[in-house]
C-alpha cells in the first residue's frame, strides 16, 4: 500500500518541512492533499512521471518532487499556522491498466502541527 | 466546489443495511461516481465507483439512478467498524483530475 513518513511532525512558524510518500507498487501517479480539521481533503497537486500534472489553489511555497522509483516529497516553505493539517498522499494506476480508471489509493497521512 | 450533496449525518443499527444517498444532478456523461470513506484521522479508503451501471464488490453496492442524477451506497450488514465519514465524488477519469471532497456524511453505526 501507500506509506507516508513521518506520522506526526511539529514545526514552528517560518520553518520549512518535507513530507515523504511511497506509492503503491506499479503506480506512477501521485497526488497530495491537505485536510484541515473537520474538513474534507483539498487537492494540492499531482505528479506523473516526475512532472507536475495539475495543481489546486495553493501558493508556490507548496512544492513537490517525484522520483524515478515513484516515491514523492511535499515541501512547504515559510510555514504558517494555517498549514497545520493532515497531509495525504494518494497514488494511482496508469490509465488503461485497470479498466481505464484512475482510482486513487490514499496513505495514512502525516499530521503537521505548526506552532 | 463539490458537485455532490450528501446528508451531514446518519445513524444505522449494527447488522442492518446502511443506505447512504448522494445527489449529483449536474453530473456529466463522462463523470464517474466514486465513494470513499475516512475513519477518524486515517487516510480515505476507496470503496467503489461506477459510471451508469450498478456495481457491487466485497465492501458495498452502488446503485445509480437511470438519469444518473443520484446514487446510493449500500453497506449490506453494517458493523461498528463502518462508522466513518463517507464521501461521494463525481470525477472525470483523466490524468490531472483530482478528487474534490465535500463534507461527506458522517455514518454512526450503533450497537
Image: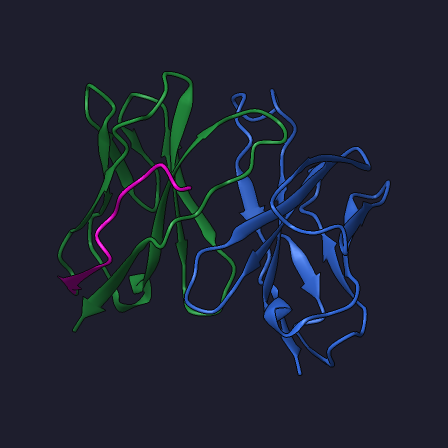
Chain colours: A blue, B green
Q: Position of residue B94 (x, y in %)?
A: 57, 24
Q: Position of residue A17 (x, y in %)?
A: 78, 68
Q: Is residue A72 visible?
A: no
The magenta region covers B1-13
Vertical side of B35 occupied by B96: above or below: above
Q: Quadrant of residue B16?
A: bottom left
Q: Residue furthest right?
A: A68
The structure residue drawn at horizontal position 36% and vertical position 36%, both measured from the top left corner, is B3
The structure residue drawn at horizontal position 76% and vertical position 50%, both measured from the top left corner, is A60
| Prevailing SS of the magenta stretch | loop
Vertical side of B9 occupied by A26: above or below: above
Q: Quadrant of residue B31?
A: top left
Q: Nearer the viewer, residue B78 or A82?
A: A82
Q: Is residue B1 visible?
A: yes
Q: Quadrant of the C terminus of chain A?
A: bottom right
Vertical side of A32 occupied by A38: above or below: below
> Is residue A17 a member of the stretch shown in magenta?
no
Q: Is residue B68 left or right of residue A114?
A: left
Q: How many marks?
A: 0
The structure residue drawn at horizontal position 36% and vertical position 20%, both measured from the top left corner, is B28
The structure residue drawn at horizontal position 36% and vertical position 16%, both measured from the top left corner, is B29
Vertical side of A30 occupied by A10: above or below: below
Q: Position of residue B70 (x, y in %)?
A: 22, 32
Q: Position of residue B73 (x, y in %)?
A: 25, 42
> Is residue B9 a member of the stretch shown in magenta?
yes
Amino acid at each position: 500500500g501507500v506509506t507516508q513518513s513521518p506520522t506526526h511532525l511539529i514545526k514552528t512558524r517560518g520553518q520549512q518541512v518535507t513530507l515523504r510518500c511511497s506509492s503503491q507498487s506499479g503506480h506512477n501517479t501521485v497526488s497530495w492533499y491537505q485536510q484541515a480539521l473537520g474538513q474534507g481533503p483539498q487537492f494540492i497537486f499531482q505528479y506523473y512521471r516526475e512532472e507536475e500534472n495539475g495543481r489546486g489553489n495553493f501558493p508556490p511555497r507548496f512544492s513537490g518532487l517525484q522520483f524515478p522509483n515513484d516515491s514523492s516529497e511535499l515541501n512547504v516553505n515559510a510555514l504558517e499556522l494555517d498549514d497545520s493539517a493532515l497531509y495525504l498522499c494518494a497514488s494511482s494506476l496508469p490509465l488503461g491498466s485497470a479498466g481505464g480508471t484512475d482510482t486513487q489509493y490514499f496513505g495514512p497521512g502525516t499530521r503537521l502541527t505548526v506552532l | 466546489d463539490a458537485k455532490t450533496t450528501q446528508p451531514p449525518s446518519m445513524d444505522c443499527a449494527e447488522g442492518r443495511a446502511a443506505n447512504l444517498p448522494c445527489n449529483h444532478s449536474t453530473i456529466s456523461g463522462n463523470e464517474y461516481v466514486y465513494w470513499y470513506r475516512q475513519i477518524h484521522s486515517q487516510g480515505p479508503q476507496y470503496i467503489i465507483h461506477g459510471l451508469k451501471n450498478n456495481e457491487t464488490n466485497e465492501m458495498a453496492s452502488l446503485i445509480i439512478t437511470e438519469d444518473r442524477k443520484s446514487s446510493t451506497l449500500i453497506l449490506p450488514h453494517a458493523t461498528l467498524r463502518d462508522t466513518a465519514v463517507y464521501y461521494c465524488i463525481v470525477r472525470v477519469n483523466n490524468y490531472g483530475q483530482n478528487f474534490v471532497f465535500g463534507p461527506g456524511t458522517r455514518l454512526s453505526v450503533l450497537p
